[in-house]
Image (cartoon, coloured by chain):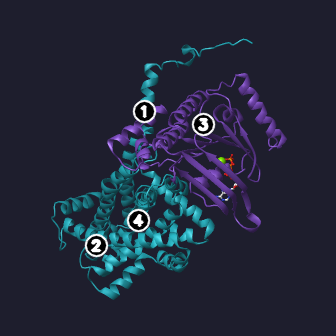
Amino acid sequence: MAEIKIKNLHKEFGTGEDKVVALEDVNLEITGHSFVSIVGPSGCGKSTLLNILTGIETPTNGTVEITSDGHVAAPGYVFQAARLLPWRTVTDNLLFVQEDRSDETKKRCQRYLEMVQLGDKGDKFPGELSGGMQQRVGIARAFSIEPDVLFMDEPFSHLDAITARALRRELHHMWDETKKMVVFVTHDVGEAVELSNRILVFAKGGSLEDDIQIDLPFPRDPADDEVAVAKAHVLRKFEELDLLAS
Amino acid sequence: MTVTETRPSAAGRSQPTPSPAQRLIAMPVRIAKSPHSARVLFPIALFVVWLLSLAAVEEIWPFAVDVLPTPSEVGGFMWDEFVTDTLARKNLYETFFISLRRLMSGFAIAMVLGTGLGLAMGLSRATNAFCHDWTMAILAMPALAWALFNSIIFGFDDRGPILTVILAGIPFVIVNVREGVRNTPRELFDMARSFQVPQSKIIRHVLVPSLMPFMFAAARYCFSIGWKGLVIAEVFGGQDGAGWTIKFWYDAHRAHGVVGYAAFFVIFAILFERLVFEPVSRRAFRWRPQLQTEVVEEAFGEHHEHYGEDHHGEGEAARR
Ligand SMILES: Nc1ncnc2c1ncn2[C@@H]1O[C@H](COP(=O)(O)OP(=O)(O)OP(=O)(O)O)[C@@H](O)[C@H]1O
Ligand SMILES: [Mg+2]
């Protein structure tokens, strides 16, 4: 079981005049088989939080701890932009982040490429794929290491509605099956309500403003009354926090 | 609400077929406009201009007949050289082999040293500050000056020409590699680190490939600038080699020899480009299918543009 502990997390960029506070005193615990969505306006520190959790950035103050059954958890990260190696083929991009190149590993990579419907594109270079396809390769890459915690930064925002829907279902299926933890950034409240059992609302300035539990059964149909009510509830919170204006 | 569907009709898109007469006229125009025939046209135009200017000069100054080479003289000379029938001490192949050996030695040293220095300057501000002015000074110095210095210091052996190649080429390597280091894709390093990819693998699969376009630009410039430097160095400080041989024909008052040998230089450079740089670049940059070899020049041009903005004057010097 994975566990995330964030204590008094503070992050700022630059100094003096240029100082930007990206995260302000965030305290948070996420445990077990959770699907947590992080929502909030642009620039409220969502990507920064994921970067700190995955070790790309270091906190200015405070601590973060990600463990899985007592050892350091292996994170998988789907970035806001695909971040593929342009000089490696799609398959090699997946193999790049693997620990070995055994046949078993290769089969696993191929399986995840098929999951994102790119099973026949393994030999292509990223430059030969569309933006949405590249994003899907990034998703397959994060899945392919079968991480303890999966971090996703607006992974579906560049995809067409139908593909996004299919992948959302796939993601949810995987989450259900593997009992892993997913931390999911989105600016789409509907998406957050449909997928997650917990929604964290961040405000401008990087403060955690609300922590909403949604205990509805999956799969959730957006047209369903209860789901619509939950979405309206989150949107109302947004209004209260005056987040919609920004 | 109604939804109306309109299919684009096939008939509307077809164009009227041209008559046979129209096609007959269109054909030569199309041939003349094609890039292939334009390419073939260039040597023909060159030939015509050559003959015309010969005729014109002879009209004004009849003595020039003995001095100015005709195409047939040059062609004959080149053929004789080609079949190793020469008055010079060494035949064409020996001569170019000697020069190529010097060029390659200097090129290899310039690439290795320049890459090391470029990496150091890209990674460390202090190193950059220390070496920057020296690099620019070397860059600003004409190859001719190096050739003269080196022949004074080393006399007539291999060291002078090789050192000239190094000095002519190394600033391009340094500047390109440093720029490559400064342009490394940070977001890809972050990606690799977040996936806990080991450092050695990151260097091999992220750092090195990201430097490749810059290394390649460095190699090309180092090679072509080094080659020109070498020829000059051999004119002043050689006993053999391509530069020495063109000087030999010059001293022997054989204008067709000078022109013919100059043509060999061009052929040599083109062969090298076609047989070495193009295939290598096609392989190395397969992942940029649409850009092919042009990418290198672009990268080079771009960084100098960007360069001129930050440091005044440098861009100018580097562009020469
Ligand atoms: N490397 C950096 N250097 C300087 N400032 C940064 C850096 N990364 C982020 N910031 C700043 O920190 C703040 C939070 O950025 P972040 O990328 O986390 O926002 P976000 O919530 O992900 O926004 P979006 O929804 O638009 O992706 C912004 O004001 C941004 O300008
Ligand atoms: Mg972001």
- Distance between the alpha carbons at the discs numbered 3 and 4: 78 Å
Q: Could you tell me which secondary element the residue under label 3 belongs to?
A: loop
Chain letter belonging to callout 1: A
Mark 2 to mark 3 CA distance (whole Å)? 57 Å
Label 4 to label 1: alpha-carbon separation: 75 Å
Gap between marks 4 and 2 measured at Cα: 44 Å
- Classify B240 as above or below A159: below
Amino acid tagged 4: Ile
Relative to the observer, which residue lies in front, B132 or A126?
Answer: A126
Say which quarter of the image contains residue B72: bottom left
Q: Colour of chain B?
A: cyan
Identify the residue under disc 2: B102
Confirm or reject: label 1 Cβ below 8 Å from ligand 2: no
Horizontal side of residue A138 vs A160, given as left or right: left
Q: Identify the chain of the residue marked 2, using the numbered disc in the image.
A: B
As drawn, the chain in purple is A
Q: Quadrant of the C terminus of chain A?
A: top right
Query: What residue is pinned by disc 4?
Result: B60
Q: Circle 3 is placed at which residue position?
A: A156
Q: Secondary structure at mark 2?
A: helix
| C-alpha distance separating marks 1 and 3 | 19 Å
* Residue depth check, mark 3 versus mark 4: number of the one nearer the observer: 3
Q: Is residue A58 above or below residue B88?
A: above
The residue labelled by disc 1 is: A119
Q: Are marks 3 and 4 on the same chain?
A: no
Local packing at callout 4 (Cα closer than 10 Å; few below 14, some 14-19, many 20+) is few
Which of these two is toward me, B177 or B104?
A: B177
- Residue B98 screen position, x and y as percent: 23, 71
In the image, B71: left or right of A216? left
